[in-house]
């Protein structure tokens, strides 16, 4: 008979796409700027291109091609190229900085605040994002997100999916990996966490990439929990206690 795994003490969360709606938020910010400046831009395509530049930019840092830099800095590097690509002109430096800080103003998914508050009753909850500490702090303040603490890949000078991020979080929170659960809407993040000995929870976010996207939302038997949202996750974890 298989022994029951030890109880999860800490939940750490991917943020972009899992907790907050990056795409819808960036589109809203772009349209607001477009109205103010008279810009004719496909803001959905702009948001998708901005996000698409994220992994290649991190890969350049992880390979040593670029020195370590924060996600804020990588977002600005990508943004500077997108302004040229989309023919956006006439923005002053402060306006470009304000647009880059749109990542600090991403709106939480509708279940996020209530779900996190419910999960917090029985667990320590923390971010574990590639976003830098300043970005995550501003984002959490903006969205009134009830974290116990904010952890960032910046603390470890590595990006997910490097093992140093997952194991570093366990070390900082003083729990063994098997009592730490990674919560994410992205299966690659969860597979990397599982390889480090963490527990895993997949949360479906069907609208992360827009209504036309067809993301993989199927249950994954390799994960400890598959949930429809944070409230569903709370119910399932409570049943397993």
Image (cartoon, rainbow, N blue to C red):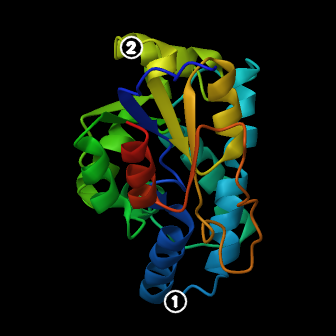
Q: In this view, does 210 lie above or below 95?
A: below
Q: In this view, does 7 lie above or below 35?
A: above
Q: In which quarter of the image is the N terminus?
A: top right
Please name the residue shown 29% across and 42% down the image.
137
Please name the residue shown 58% across and 63% down the image.
205
Do the CB atoms of the residues marked 2 and 1 lie less than 8 Å apart? no
Q: Quadrant of the C terminus?
A: top left
State left or right for residue 143 relative to residue 49: left
Q: Which of marks 2 and 1 is nearer the N terminus?
A: 1
Residue 94 locus on image (x, y percent): 38, 59
Q: Name the disc covering residue 21, or none.
A: none
State left or right for residue 231 relative to residue 137: right
Q: Which one is nearer the viewer's eye here, 128 or 60?
A: 128
Q: In this view, does 167 lie above or below 124?
A: above
Q: Which one is nearer the viewer's eye here, 180 or 143?
A: 180
Residue 97 visible: no
Where residue 11 sits, quadrant-wise, is top left
Q: Which one is nearer the viewer's eye here, 90 or 138?
A: 138
At numbered mark 2, what does the secondary structure look like: helix, strand or loop?
Answer: loop
Please name the residue shown 22% across and 43% down the image.
121
Q: In this view, does 137 lie above or below 178?
A: below
Where residue 224 sits, quadrant-wise, is top right
Q: Name the residue under label 2.
A: 175
Residue 91 locus on image (x, y percent): 49, 69
Residue 128 visible: yes
Where residue 187 sits, quadrant-wise, is top right
Q: How far apart are marks 2 and 1 (CA)?
A: 52 Å
Residue 106 locus on image (x, y percent): 41, 62
At numbered mark 1, what does the secondary structure look like: helix, strand or loop?
Answer: loop
Q: Name the residue under label 1.
A: 38
């Amino acid at each position: 008979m298989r022994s029951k795994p030890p109880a999860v003490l800490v939940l750490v969360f991917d943020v972009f796409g899992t907790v907050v709606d990056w795409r819808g938020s960036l589109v809203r910010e772009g349209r607001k700027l477009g109205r103010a400046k008279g810009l004719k831009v496909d803001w959905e395509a702009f948001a998708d291109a901005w996000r698409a530049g994220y992994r290649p930019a991190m890969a350049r840092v992880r390979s040593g091609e670029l020195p370590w830099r924060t996600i804020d800095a990588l977002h600005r590097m990508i943004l500077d190229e997108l302004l040229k690509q989309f023919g956006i002109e006439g923005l002053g430096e402060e306006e470009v900085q304000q647009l880059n800080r749109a990542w600090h103003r991403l709106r939480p998914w509708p279940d996020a605040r209530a779900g996190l508050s419910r999960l917090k009753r029985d667990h320590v909850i923390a971010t574990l994002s590639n976003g830098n500490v300043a970005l995550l702090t501003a984002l959490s303040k903006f969205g009134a997100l009830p974290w116990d603490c904010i952890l960032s890949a910046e603390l470890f000078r590595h990006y997910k999916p490097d093992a140093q991020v997952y194991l570093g979080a366990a070390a900082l929170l003083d729990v063994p990996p098997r009592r730490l659960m990674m919560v994410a809407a992205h299966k690659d993040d969860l597979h990397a966490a599982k390889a480090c000995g963490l527990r895993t929870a997949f949360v479906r976010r069907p609208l992360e990439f827009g209504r036309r996207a067809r993301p993989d939302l199927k249950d994954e038997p390799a994960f400890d929990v598959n949930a429809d949202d944070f409230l569903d996750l709370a119910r399932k974890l409570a049943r397993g206690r």
